[in-house]
């Protein structure tokens, strides 16, 4: 029995966290039956979502979840790809996860209006009067992490320029193919779908939405894969 610990279907997205959406899509790509349950960050093995429980084995981190599926279920997400294609797919995935993600985090957490519409919802269970100070502490930690990563040291214009390059690279590699590397989905499609969908989320006021929306192949890709892997989201 596989249980994926998630943050939940928030902001009109399959999950508030792109890493959770990625992990859920990996399970779908591998054809594994699973259930989802809301995960409490305080119980998270590495303090982050997602994590997976598979017959008593606990696996933190979306990439370690991929490795677990590859190993335990002998599933090759990149079957049919040549070595250079596997290399490009991995590079795109990490461009989005370890670079573009921070631009998205900055837009959602550091902008007051976006924070109020989005991440503030994470704290709705915190009783008053502590809620405001708990939220401020969490935002301060995100600001510190953004500085530690480096993205938080750029101006808003610079972040937008970096995000534009990142999305432009994905657009160019995807071209008019149905999936990142061609006719079949590969492992990196789980990340591409998660991050493109997150970038296009209309709830947030950020240049990322316009940058992603101006790339028609990204919009079509999001719509196509949403219908294929998360059709229930289209009905909501
Ligand atoms: N490398 C991790 C990243 C996961 C991650 O950053 N999750 C965020 C949500 S998008 C999280 O749980 N953040 C909570 C925190 O940092 O306190 C993965 O691939 O799963």
Image: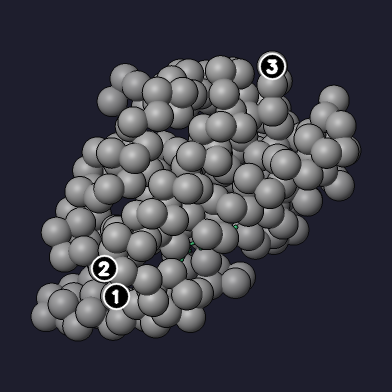
Per the rendering, the mark at residue 110 is 2
- Locate residue 168, reporting x and y percent: 48, 39
Q: Secondary structure at mark 3?
A: loop
Q: Which residue is mark 1?
A: 139
Q: Earlier in the sequence, mark 3 or mark 1?
A: 1
Q: Earlier in the sequence, mark 2 or mark 1?
A: 2
Residue at coordinates 24% horizontally, 54% vertically from top-left? Answer: 118
Closest to the observer: 110 or 158?
Answer: 158
Viewer-side label of 3, 1: 3
**On-image quarter of the N terminus:** top right
**222 lies above or below 55:** above
Q: Is residue 105 toward the left or the right of residue 186 in the image?
A: left
Q: Position of residue 204 (x, y in %)?
A: 23, 48
Residue 226: image x %, image y %? 45, 25
For label 2, count other residues whose C-alpha is less than 10 Å away and answer few (under 14), some (14-19) or many (20+): some
Left or right for 139, reference 31: left
Residue 139 relative to residue 102: left or right = left
């Amino acid at each position: 029995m596989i249980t994926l610990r998630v943050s939940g279907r928030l902001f009109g997205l399959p999950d508030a966290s792109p890493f959770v959406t990625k992990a859920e899509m990996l399970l779908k790509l591998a054809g594994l039956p699973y259930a989802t349950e809301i995960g409490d960050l305080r119980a998270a093995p590495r303090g982050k979502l997602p994590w997976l429980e598979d017959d008593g084995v606990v696996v933190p981190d979306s990439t370690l979840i991929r490795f677990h599926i590859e190993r335990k279920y002998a599933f090759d997400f990149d079957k049919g790809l040549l070595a250079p294609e596997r290399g490009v797919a991995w590079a795109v995935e990490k461009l989005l996860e370890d670079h573009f993600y921070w631009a998205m985090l900055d837009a959602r957490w550091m902008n007051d209006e976006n924070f109020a519409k989005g991440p503030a919802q994470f704290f709705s269970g915190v009783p008053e009067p502590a809620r405001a100070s708990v939220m401020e502490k969490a935002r301060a930690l995100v600001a510190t992490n953004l500085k530690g990563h480096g993205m938080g040291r750029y101006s808003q214009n610079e972040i937008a320029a970096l995000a534009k390059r990142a999305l432009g690279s994905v657009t160019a590699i995807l071209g008019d193919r149905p999936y990142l590397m061609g006719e079949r989905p590969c492992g990196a499609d789980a990340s591409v779908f998660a991050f493109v969908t997150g970038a296009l989320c209309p709830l947030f006021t950020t240049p990322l939405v316009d940058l992603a929306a101006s790339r028609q192949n990204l919009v079509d890709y999001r719509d196509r894969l949403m219908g294929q892997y998360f059709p229930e989201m289209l009905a909501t």
